[in-house]
Amino acid sequence: MGIEIERKFLVIGENWRAEADEGSRIRQAYLANGGGASVRVRRADDRAWITVKGERDGIARPEFEYEIPCPDADEMLTSLCAGPMLEKVRYRVMRGALVWEIDVFEGVASGLVIAEVELASIDQPLDRPEWIGDEVTHDRRFRNAAIARDGPPCEAIVPPPIQAAS
């Protein structure tokens, strides 16, 4: 059985961008979303996956992920998935042995920025970069499945910068 051990955090500011890669555009939606499990279809650039996730136990949960052909993913995203599609750009930042993934949401969750980090064990020590804010690992509202179903938590939306009048 696959196990995902992951922590999630809100992101503070833009300083992470100086260390980030070019990013990958992601579209994802859910075939099933509720009752403790979810089945997600994700398209990222020229690759696609179907992922089954179980109920979280602390920071760990069962996860099974399988690569699928992109045309199949596109068809599932447009004809089989329920609820709004999540759109985001995922950036990666290397810090020591860890890869921080920063999701900058667009579309229905525009303004939400979340960082995730996968760990090798539940008790792995974690040095939080200066741009990491509040931890939201245990707040169900910040799970992608919940954001797709219910929309993003309003207090987490970062408004765009105010443009100076010309």
Image (cartoon, rainbow, N blue to C red):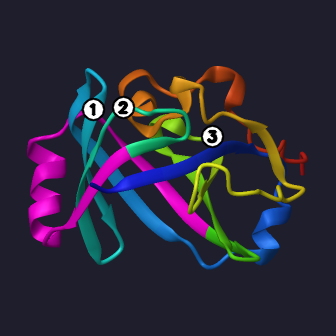
Q: Quadrant of residue 154?
A: top right
- Numbered circle sitting on residue 55: 2
Q: Is residue 31 above or below residue 19?
A: above
> Could you say where residue 72 lies in the image, as x and y percent from the top left?
9, 63
Q: Could you say which is closer to the camera, residue 148 or residue 38? A: 38
Residue 52 falls within the magenta-colored stretch? no
Q: Quadrant of the N terminus?
A: bottom left
CB-based contact (under 8 Å), mark 1 and mark 2: yes
Secondary structure under the numbered disc 1 in the rendered image: strand
Secondary structure under the numbered disc 2 in the rendered image: loop
- Residue neighbourhood size for the residue with mark 3, other residues' Cα within 10 Å, grouped as few (<14), some (14–19), many (≥20): many
> Could you say where residue 160 lies in the image, as x and y percent from the top left?
74, 43
Which stretch appears magenta?
62-91
Q: Earlier in the sequence, mark 1 or mark 2?
A: 1
CB-based contact (under 8 Å), mark 2 and mark 3: no
> Could you say where residue 28 lies in the image, as x and y percent from the top left?
32, 50
Q: Earlier in the sequence, mark 2 or mark 3?
A: 2
Residue picked out by circle 1: 37
Residue at mark 1 to residue at mark 2: CA–CA distance: 6 Å
Q: Is residue 110 above or below residue 33?
A: below
The amino acid beneath tag 2 is Glu
Closest to the camera, between mark 1 and mark 3, is: 1
- Residue neighbourhood size for the residue with mark 2, other residues' Cα within 10 Å, grouped as few (<14), some (14–19), many (≥20): some
Residue at mark 2 to residue at mark 3: CA–CA distance: 23 Å
Secondary structure under the numbered disc 3 in the rendered image: loop
The amino acid beneath tag 3 is Leu
> Could you say where residue 128 lies in the image, as x and y percent from the top left?
82, 55
The amino acid beneath tag 1 is Ala
- Numbered circle sitting on residue 112: 3
